Amino acid sequence: MKILGVDPGIHGALVIAAINDGAALQLVDVLDVPVIGTGAKERVNTMLVRNWLVGHNPDHALIERAGSMPKQGVASTFKYARAVGSLETVIACLDIPYSLIEPTVWKKFHHLRGGDKEAARQRALQLFPNACTWFARKMDHQRAEAALIALTPIPGVLPKAALVETATTESIE
């Protein structure tokens, strides 16, 4: 089963993870959200996202539920919401079933606290040691978060949730 994990936003990322019976978790591909324009006119390049998704044909998408941040300005909130809406629309138009997942849910599952981006990157490195080039830099935290989102079991969606839990337990030991 191929799962798409989405850390939404103008500087987010998309990850395709494969979860197969009896096999190790596999990170198939990573895409930083492609943008066109600059500054206030920056927006998601939806055609590049579409083409990437068509090439991977995921079975389901898990998208982090978006919300405004405290003390975030109106312009940046609008820019963020526009990016999130663009990503959700591309996924929906490709008939990819998707679920919105609360940040607290996937972070709790992966034993992460608060907004520590580095902890998410380190966790992704534990789960995908062969994919270290995708998480090599501290600024790759959005890729790591998308990967962790993809591996969060959702009842009725990810029938291989036991494999995810096993991988989580083994990687800690």
Image (cartoon, rainbow, N blue to C red):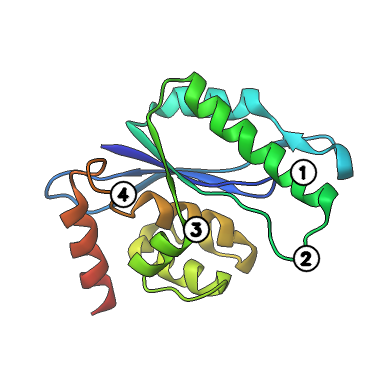
Compared with residue 142, is residue 121 higher up or lower down, i.e. above or below?
below
Q: Upstream in the sequence, badge 2 or badge 1?
A: 2
Picture coordinates of residue 41 (x, y %)? 86, 37
Name the residue tied to disc 3. Answer: 145
Q: Identify which residue is drawn at 24% across, 48% down.
A: 155
Q: Upstream in the sequence, badge 3 or badge 2?
A: 2
Q: Pick out the residue farthest to the left.
A: 22
Q: Secondary structure at mark 1?
A: helix
Cα gap from disc 3 to disc 2, whole angstroms: 23 Å
Q: Is the residue marked by circle 3 packed among few (<14), some (14-19), or many (20+) residues within 10 Å?
A: many
Q: Quadrant of the N terminus?
A: top left
Compared with residue 172, is residue 84 higher up or lower down, i.e. above or below?
above
Q: Quadrant of the C terminus?
A: bottom left
Kindly indicate whether the residue at mark 4 contacts the one at mark 1 (C-beta within 8 angstroms): no
Instruction: Name the front one of labels 2 and 4.
Output: 2
Cα gap from disc 1 to disc 3, whole angstroms: 22 Å
Name the residue tied to disc 4. Answer: 26
Left-right relation of 172 to 11: left
Q: Secondary structure at mark 2?
A: loop
Name the residue tied to disc 1. Answer: 78
Q: Upstream in the sequence, badge 2 or badge 4?
A: 4
Given the image, on which type of amino acid does mark 1 rest?
Phe
Name the residue tied to disc 2. Answer: 71
